[in-house]
Image (cartoon, rainbow, N blue to C red):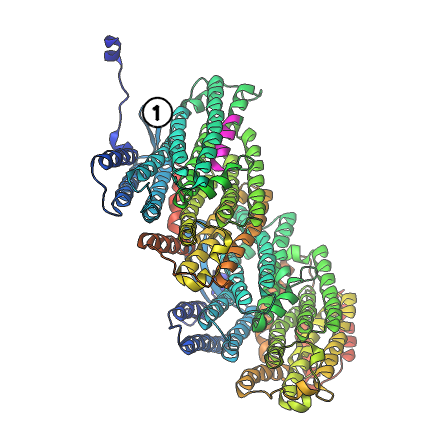
Amino acid sequence: MILAADGASLGFPILTAIVVLPVIAAVLVLFTPRRNPEYAQLLAGAATVGTAALTIWLLSSFETGEAGFQFVSKQTWIEPWGISWHLGVDGISLFLVALTAFIFPLVIIGIDPEREHKSYLAWMLLLEAGVLGTFLSLDLFMFFLFFEIIIVPMYFLVAGWGHEEREYAATKFFLYTMFGSAFMLVGVVATAVIARNSLGYLTFDLIEIAEGANFATSTGRWLFFAFAIAFAVKVPIVPVHTWLPLSHTQAGHRSVILAGVLLKLGSYGLVRFGIYLFPEAAFWDFTRYLFLTLAVIGIIYGAIAATMQPDLKMLVAYSSVAHMGFIILGTFAFTEQGLTGATLQNVNHGVSTGALFLLVGWMYERQHTRMIADFNGIQTVAPIFAAGFMIVMLSSIGVPGLNGFVGEFLILLGSWDTARWWTIVGATGVILAALYLLWAYQRTFHGVPDEKSKTFPELKVREAAVLLPFIAVIVFTGVYPKPLLDRINPSVDALLEHVEERTDLVRPEPEISQEQLERAQIELEEEHGEEELSTEEGSDEGEDE
Amino acid sequence: MLAQVDTFVGPEVNWFALSPLIALVAGALLMMLAGALTPRWPNGLYALACATTAGTAGALAMVQWDDITDNGPTTLVAGAVAFDTFSMFVTILICVSIILVAMLADDYLRGTPNDGPEIYALLLTAGAGGVVMASANDLIVLFLGLETLSLALYVLAASNRRSNRSGESGIKYFVLGGFASAFFLYGIALVYGATGTTNISEMVVALQNTVDLETPDGLALAGVALLLVGLGFKVAAVPFHIWTPDVYQGAPSPVTAFMASVAKAAAFAAMLRVLVIALPFYRDDWRPVIWVLALLSLLVGSVVAVVQTDVKRMLAYSSISHAGFLLVGVEAAGHTAGELDPGSGMSAVMLYLMLYSVMVIGSFAVVLVVQRHAGGDSSIEAFRGLSMRRPAIATAFTVFLLAQAGVPFTSGFIAKFGVIQAAVDVDSYAIAVIAMVSAVIAAFVYLRIMLTVWTGTPAENSEPIRVPLAVGVTIAGAAVFTLFAGIIPGWLIDATDTVTQYAR
């Protein structure tokens, strides 16, 4: 509590409001008249915009440079079990909250469910509350509640508004994620019960356990893996990724949410509830190399699988597997740049892959096909649409000047120090990404349009209004990532310090890493190549050892 | 002869302490008597009388609860009946369930030959049997309670005279239940042989002082094993579960709801009484058995439920899997049985029973509504497109199913969490993980039902589904409770934490 209390506070439970507002709206939506879906849409839109507005307030009052949790609200909830309603935000979760709060209004406004508006919107709002709750929870029990509740609205959204195989996809999604959570629930309980031995009382509070409890080495490792299974499924890390392409293709437009936000729950969870709670187990060689290896396998496998896809949506889905591999690589590099990059890339991937899914969804809406072979020369018919697609795609590839580059670059920079071989293999993923995306773009947008593609409608105003914010974020983050990095960095630094105190992790002096960061910044603005920095990195390496 | 009678001094009876039980029995007798002597009562009055009786008994139990928490537990009627929070909690649970079931039964019975006081009197009698089981401090008294409950249930299961299935269900239950009772009685006899008493308090003393626990006592162990068979049958644990699907499917839906709530709660209460309170000295012997029963119930219950096509059978198998969860709690209680700090196993089981009873009655209430509409068909096809025809009912049904699957913000999650916590508390990690994984398998079943309810389209010629007021109120009440207890469970957890003060 004391550890959490430093940092900003508004005298208003803003985080609770952010979580509860969509829930209230979801209940209200159910009471709107069935005949007039526009009321429901108006209400849901207003609620999500309201949540986004609260998030803007949050972003502007967030104290930069502060590492601890801010805007903390803590209220006893289930006293006999030591459970409290405990919310807080720090640099690691801040932008994920913002991402969630911004993506939902765009999706709700930008996409028409076509039928059953009321229940669709109610589920969407509950989903938003669940995701926000997960990112903000500082209590193991609460985190689990939100983490697990998300699968319910998601299940109904996929099953109710998806494509042909939606029921199968929804069921597979539900069972996969629930299977992962089964272990996590036992892990959550065991963590609290075992922590009681060293704390002297039963509590599910994340901070109290992470700071105060001592786990025996083997106990900590078991617990870590109980959590990690659930997160690995969610990320997804190869080999538990098979639910993802299916769910994405069948989810219809919900795949925007799926890719944009839901996958982040896994990578966020690994940082917050894996590394923070069990630093020893996470830094343990076996864990580290296991995750690094799986991450690299994911990068390569995802890229190769994406190249082979005849279906645009499948292609983007597999590219998600590859991108999430990068995030895991950066997370388990245990360096400041790596972790900062992974945190930033979480947001970047949400933005660019979310936008890609949105675009592919609109293409499907127009032509009722997702097959690459069915599109030809769209560029000549719909140049604006093609331009939008191009920018988003380049961001996904990681072209300098756009957001994807900053994240991937920091990740590779960070992992170079501690996991060189993995970095070298992983870096080829960047090239592969260029291959499959550009090739797909070429086949779809270039060439001479055939009869069917000639009728491809241009980007509509409503679509443009939804797409523009995405592109704005893509460009802004790519050109000027400093505001984000300044807020992420202190928390990442504090987390690594936490790991350092509890393991034999040795980090370079903070000044150097700060310097490196700034250097990276300059490099970025000058749009230099990758090689040069890698060699500079190499010179720093001597100090590590 | 007469002189002997004169010298017989009956035990002193604290009548007021027994009042919940007396209220149930008196209500049952009065309903039978008055029902026989008066012409047919107006619609709904029988159910009202039954619910009022149960409500009175429940209220009295709450008064006793306060008394016990103030003055501590004690025994009544010369040590035959325990007067503790444990028995009062189960009494309240049973009374609540009776009220809910009576509301379901009312409309169900209208227009059938059974529309009279008999069914309600049987419900009250069975409830009284359950209360006796939960509060027995003597194995013979416990057996009396068990038989009172069982005999009433046999009749109730067979009560739908127009359905062959119902008759079959009653006979099956009767024959197999008779066997189980015989096992149980034999077990009592053997334990009596080993300890020289059937009274639980005296048994504990006897085991503490005279019985040499170092050398295994074949007689007592055989007795414990036979008791386990009898109890295993009553709680429907695998491999003593064979009767469950047929009986659940065949019995009238209100009766099925009653079995899944009252009978299960009473059986688990009896199991805790016998194993944890009476036989803690054999805990290392019976605990592994419970472990295996839990494992089998969890896996068989959830796996076999997947291949069912009838919703009542699905719920029957899911109730077996829930029994597995409860057994996980019993196993956890077994680790610390007889110790000063009784651990959290027992309160977790009580919490689970309370929450499960309400959600299972709610589920069967929905089945009842749909089944009536479909002319007695309870297959999954009858539920197709329920959301289109009755969105409110479909929503409530979804709440119940999600709760049974253990999804957060429903009472089912709190129930499972309590049990898992109790298990982890005593390092029973393996069974905790198995329980959670089997919950995932079971979730598949609930998903299948939900999918049918929400995505299917109803048959063309379907008439509007009639939902009688009392049934609607029951469903709504159960759904609200399921959500409420899932979000604000503290008060209930506090209550169950006190049930570990039991009388010796």
Q: Residue at x 68, y 87 (%)?
A: A451
Q: Which residue is mark 1?
A: B79
- Residue B201 is drawn in which quadrant? top left
- Image coordinates for residue A300, horizontal then vertical, percent: 75, 68
In this view, the residue in front, A504 or A122, is: A122
In this view, the residue in front, B130 or B419, is: B130
Q: Helix or strand or loop: what does disc 1 sit on?
A: loop
Q: Main secondary structure of the magenta part?
A: helix
Q: Residue at x 26, y 33 (%)?
A: B29
Range shown magenta = B226-236
In this view, the residue in front, A377 or B89, is: A377
Query: Residue A152 magenta-drawn?
Result: no
- Residue A235 is drawn in which quadrant? bottom right
Q: Is residue A11 above or below residue B456?
A: below
- Image coordinates for residue B59, horizontal then vertical, percent: 28, 42
Instruction: Answer yes or no: is residue A383 visible.
Output: yes
Q: Quadrant of the N terminus of chain B?
A: top left
